[in-house]
Amino acid sequence: MPAGTSVMTNTVKTDVLIVGAGPTGLSLAIELGLRGVRALVVERQPRTGTQPRAKTTNVRSMEHMRRWGIASVLRAAAPLPSDYPTDIVFATRLFGRQLAVIENAFAGAKIRDPRFSEPAQWVPQFTVEAVLRDRVAAMDSIELMFNAELEDAEQSADGVVATVRNLTDGKPLTVLCKYLIGADGARSRVRSIIGVRMQGEHAYALNHSVILRIPELQRTPPDRRAIMYWIINPAAPAVMGPMDGEGRWYFMVTLPPDVKDLDDATIRRRVCEAVGRNVDIEILTRDIWAAHRLIADRYRNGRVFLAGDACHLHPPFGGYGMNLGIADAVDLGWKLAATIQGWGGPALLDSYEIERRAVHQRTIEEAVANYRVLSAQLIKDSLDDDSEEGERARADVGAEILETKTREFMTLGVVLGSRYRESPIIVEDGSAPPQEHSAIYEPSAHPGCLAPHAWLADGSSLYDHFGLGYTLLILDKTAAPNALAQAAERAGVPLTIVALSEPGLRALYGASLALIRPDQYVAWRGSRVEDADAIVATLRGEDASAPAAIKKKEARA
């Protein structure tokens, strides 16, 4: 029973009730727990199993793991060795003719890159969830309650009253909270309660994912190690890859419109066709899922918010899904904490949907574009022929693969380059925003962009020095930061001051001063301060009209 529960009335009080203990809900709980905000997380499922679901924890999510102190824990828990190459191989069969290779997919190579603090990690979602749960369990202000589901909720100007039922004994629990968050996935109960509708295309393709044990592939793996093999042949177009070094593999096929399922014999036949030889197969688990292109018509109703799959769904091509939900949780988490702790103004929570919706729309378009070209669309005659015609066909398909599929695996332009535009809590500086690319990431300190990363002389990441509240970067000894620091103190805004004289940082940020949000995005930059109180008022969401007034007065050097 959650701490603070009254045995007599079976009622619990908390600041935030989070429905759903997947990556989104757990990440939100961590953001709140780091700031001492009380939260109860309820989850109806045990959240265990062998289906990996998401397999890519991208660069940005790994940077959050670093902030939360668990990046190295997650890497140690990953079932593939740390030096395993994050390459994508396209071939006619696993033991067939290679057509193309995309190396270092998702920027997962374990090298030090100046653009980010953590490379991506190839790891099943259930392992990510286990690591997140352990982190949440160590937080005094957070409670986890499994085998419990939300039945109903009502809100008023003062808070939310929710009814949660214990699925073990059937007893109801009344939860009194300030905010209710639906991180409860595609079939969100919270979304239904507040009357939000999903808009777009429902289930325009079915896919069959199978987890297999193939002992021969443990004894004799493919010559080229990779995290994913795209199999391109007419008998078994598919995507497959290793889950560990013990013979467990995932195998995924998109079903034709007239097929709703595959029987065991068909799966075994297709896997052998994909491998290129007869192999013994043990089917561990199967999952049929639909690809959607959906976004909620709104993310909020008063004190109730939606995050993750509860408000956006797209094909899982590009590794965006779970990571997009984690980013939702980070954006919403610090804003909820600021509001509950009294320093966040009314525009702060309003900014959540404004900022995230544009990112969701961009990311959904990328995922849908990736989904248009699957293994079956790349098949050509003679791909396996040992002839000049076969050579030409393989060269043509290889070129087509690199042209059409690179964007799916080179994603930093989306993962790190998506910016918050038209946000009421960002102060524009009059400069031209950077162009957005799907594959290319060009660091920029333009307000609304992710703060440019740098490695410092002591080996630490610049991000390691940012605080839980706002951070004021001082990049020039001649800058005068006192007015901003004093304005933040007057407004009760937590502020960490970081003064650095590292070569190149001033040029990287294009200003002497920069205010960095708790989620590491640039909120303001400049080389002089005309109205510090107005800047801080905007950043804390006190006055949504402030940015226009500030823009006229502030000038970036």
Image (spheres, rainbow, N blue to C red):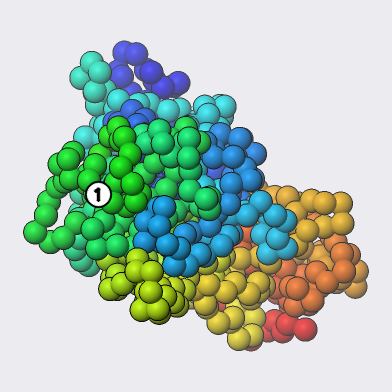
Q: Is residue 133 visible?
A: yes
174 vs 347, left or right, is left
Q: Which residue extends farthest top?
A: 8
The x and y percentages for residue 158 are 37, 44
The x and y percentages for residue 321 are 40, 55
Q: Is residue 188 visible?
A: no
Name the residue rendered at 53%, 53% in the picture: 224
Q: Nearer the viewer, residue 377 or 360?
A: 377
Name the residue rendered at 45%, 21% in the picture: 3
Inspect the image, locate mark 1, and give the three-letter code of the amino acid beneath it: Arg
Q: Which residue is mark 1?
A: 270
Q: Is residue 243 above or below residue 104?
A: above
Q: Is residue 379 above or below residue 341?
A: below
Tag 1's secondary structure? helix
Which quarter of the rendering shows the C terminus?
bottom right
499 vs 64, left or right, is right
Q: Which quadrant holds residue 491?
A: bottom right
Q: Which residue extends farthest left?
A: 258
Q: Which quadrant holds residue 383?
A: bottom left
Give the total of numbered labels: 1
The x and y percentages for residue 358 are 41, 70
The x and y percentages for residue 256 are 16, 60
61 vs 249, left or right, is right
Q: Nearer the viewer, residue 123 or 423?
A: 123
68 vs 350, left or right, is right
Q: Nearer the viewer, residue 101 or 524?
A: 101
